[in-house]
Image: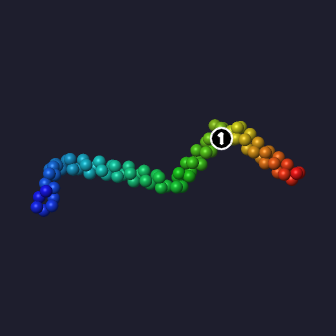
Amino acid sequence: MSANGRNDTTVARDPATIEADIVRQRQELARTVDALSDKLDVKARAEHKVAELKNSATTDSGRPRPVLVLTAGSAVAGIALLMWWRRRG
């Protein structure tokens, strides 16, 4: 270390290298900002999730998947049967 407290082992760099580093850091910063922006965009994430769920719950023609219809019907029938059984007893 020198008397002024700075490290004298710094490497002298040419302007082209410095400019390339600045460009690289700007690109990296832009990617980071984009990633944070995407992560914090709650509305877009919610819309994406809704579209994902709709896609998984419907067929290619837009109709509900038969398995889901049967499952929902069975659940409703089970609840109705349980309510009937509790009132009866």
Quarter where residue 3 is shown: bottom left
Taking the image as drawn, is residue 63 in sight?
A: no
Q: Whole-percent x and y of residue 8? A: 13, 54
Q: Amino acid at mark 1?
A: Thr
> Which residue sits furthest bottom?
4
Q: Whole-percent x and y of residue 73? A: 76, 43
Disc 1 secondary structure class: loop
Q: Whole-percent x and y of residue 88? A: 89, 51
Q: Residue at x 65, y 42 (%)?
A: 57
- Is 26 left, or right, of 55 in this rendering? left
- Is 58 left, or right, of 31 in this rendering? right
> Which residue sits furthest left?
3
Circle 1 is placed at which residue position? 58
Q: Residue at x 11, y 58 (%)?
A: 2
> Which residue sits furthest front?
89
Q: Residue at x 61, y 45 (%)?
A: 53
